[in-house]
Amino acid sequence: MSSIVGDPCLSCSQHRAQSLVRLGLSPDRWDYLIALAGNPNTGKSTVFNALTGLRQHTGNWPGKTVVRAEGAFGHEGQRVKVVDLPGTYSLQAGSMDEEVARDFVLFGRPDVTVVVVDATRLERNLNLVLQILEITDRVVVFLNLMDEARRHGVALDVPKLERELGVPVVPGVAREGIGIDDLLVATNEVATGVRQTAPFRFDRHADEIEDTIGDLVPIVEKVYPEVPNARWVALRLLNADEAVQEAVLSGELGQLSRDDSGEVHQPPIETEREELLGASVRLRWKLPSEFHDILTRHAYDEAEKVAGRVQMQGIKKVGFAFDRKLDALLTSPIFGFPLMLLILAIVFWVTIEGANVPSAMLATLLIDTVHPWLKGLSALIGVWGWLDGLLLDGVYLATAWVVSVMLPPMAIFFPVFTLLEDFGYLPRVAFNLDSLFRAAGAHGKQALTMCMGFGCNAAGVVATRVIDSPRERLIAIITNNFSLCNGRWPTQILIATIFIGALAPANFGGLVSAASVVGIALLGIVTMFVASWLLSRTVLRGEATSFSLELPPYRPPRVLQTLYTSIIDRTLIVLWRAVLFAVPAGAVIWLMSNVTLGGESVAYHLVEWLNPVGLLLGLNGVILLAYVVAIPANEIVIPTVLMLTVLTGGLVGGTGPGIMFEADSLGATEALLRGGGWTLLTAVNLMLFSLLHNPCSTTIYTIYKETRSAKWTVVATVLPVAMGVTVCFLVAQVWRIVAA
């Protein structure tokens, strides 16, 4: 591998040590720094692995929930640091990913920024390249996937593209190692100043826009003379970039910058900072209302022009007719929504139906086989009765229920969902739902997090990292619980089958019960819109931000990689968190069922105490207590309900107090529930409360990790409970009035 050599002083002077420390790096640990940028799915990770091999590690950016990868390599005594920036389509700093990438290129001032570009989608990728060239001139473009480009009939004039961009362009195929050595030579030349660049700059905008920019730039230079690109800062302020506005007001913009002499500049006085922000607000009114769209269109237009000029004449220009035809169908105002609902319905059907058999097998193994064996072993070795009950009937059974119910659907849903993501369909979902979410004061990308929430709300909360503004991300986090997760589907299906399906003729019972479950899921989506609208007009007041969604190309999904990442990174991690919370829940359930007060179990007293409230809501005390103790995992609600019904109602069933169970048949389950006083109202309100109640403990913990705020964690926990109580109360009162 080629080495990066040169006078270290040339490079060291370019780094802003204070900024790098704030960005989480120690500038004294390498000779040269490379930032790796690019759109998602361009092979950026492959380039990173080719450069660093096994000498890499991952973590989070300081103060951010955005994963970063760092690596290093050495040759001939030179130490080279490589930072893999989040994959992003732009540097508008709407999402955290974009903000991290933007801040690192602007303030970290790497010796060279390598932008990995998909040669088969040059026009789409050049938008990011041109934005980076607006910030720094130390850029090398790696034109990846040249083999795929040739197979598609795409031929590019690489020398001409290099002249157009004004920076080195290296063609290659990263997965085969082609072009990596040439890439290192180019980065060496740019990083050390051996090769001078003359980067592409956008043409002037209309006179009224340029005049406004020209009025603001001198003020930026006066207040923050150390900022390397005052025009870029002015554009971001005029575009109401929240991150840049906050950096200006707090003085962080200056603290993140340092000139080459090493002098740390003191932040300007508060009045100067306020003057700059005030000027940007005043000047913003001189701009046309579609200013953001003008900037976005201008960038795309320039990218299109450059791409058009470098496609070689006489060679088939591939317009990717398949992509356009498929987009015309999937994003159509007429067919887009029905197809989206059909695809999501198929995903849910595959998940539910596909999980039935493995869930039953796991339950048989863990509960019907392993649990009795453990009980026998415990008796054989003489374990104390109370310890046996606590560990095996409480902790173990709760964990077994969670694993048997959660694992199969997640192991199906996440891979299928990820395959749709790899194929490129999920951004189309966001495109279709953008107008609805914007009308609710939320962000179009919330559609993606909503869909992820149908698999697991904790995963949906993590997925909100793609959402633009912090305000809209909070809205998505708080309302994600209204997506009916896989832990609640079994409850919905069971109750609908027993109580709702029974209302229809036998031949139509299954259809009616299925329709009722789908109706609950759709009600959850409607509730999400309503809650988002309320939040955006109260505690999270603000206007919905516009965003530019670059629809990625359709690609054959990477099946093996998808299976691995989905199972390891999503399924097992979420399952592990659920198990950790299920352990204490199992212990609590057993203890409250077996510890007595006044001759009755603690559970009996709690149910009696909760019954008046439960009946007022059209539920009962058993249901309320089950949902309290099942906070760690929704999967144990029904086994807990059955156990408490038998325990407190004097019914025959189960194997003992505190031992969760499921009845052998639907008929047996129905008999137990009706014996416990359940009516059709109880069933309907349970389905509603299953949708509208607090998140599980795994999701609550994830919310706190993502927000780092106890306040917003409490809001996200309490809001659905308040809505659930209100809805159940109203339904119960109307039901009773009509019934009377």
Image: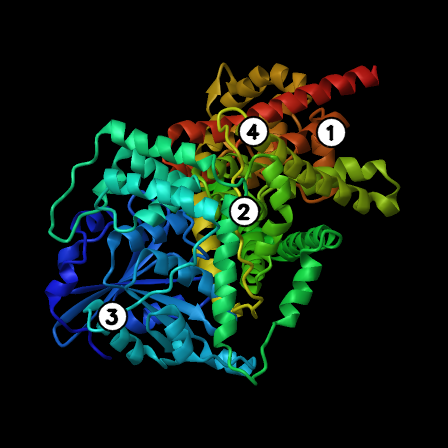
First in sequence: mark 1 vs mark 2: 2
Amino acid at circle 1: Arg
Amino acid at circle 3: Gln
Q: Distance between the residues labelled 1 and 4?
A: 28 Å
Name the residue beneath numbered marker 3: 196
**Mark 4 or 3: the one toward you:** 3
Amino acid at circle 4: Pro
Name the residue beneath numbered marker 1: 674
Name the residue beneath numbered marker 4: 720
Q: Distance between the residues labelled 3 and 1?
A: 81 Å
Name the residue beneath numbered marker 2: 445
First in sequence: mark 3 vs mark 2: 3
Q: How far apart are marks 3 and 2 (CA)?
A: 40 Å
- The image shows residue 739, relative to residue 9, as above or below, that is above
Residue in front for this viewpoint, 272 or 707: 272
Residue 378 visible somewhere in the drawing: no
- What is the x, y in percent for residue 592? 48, 26
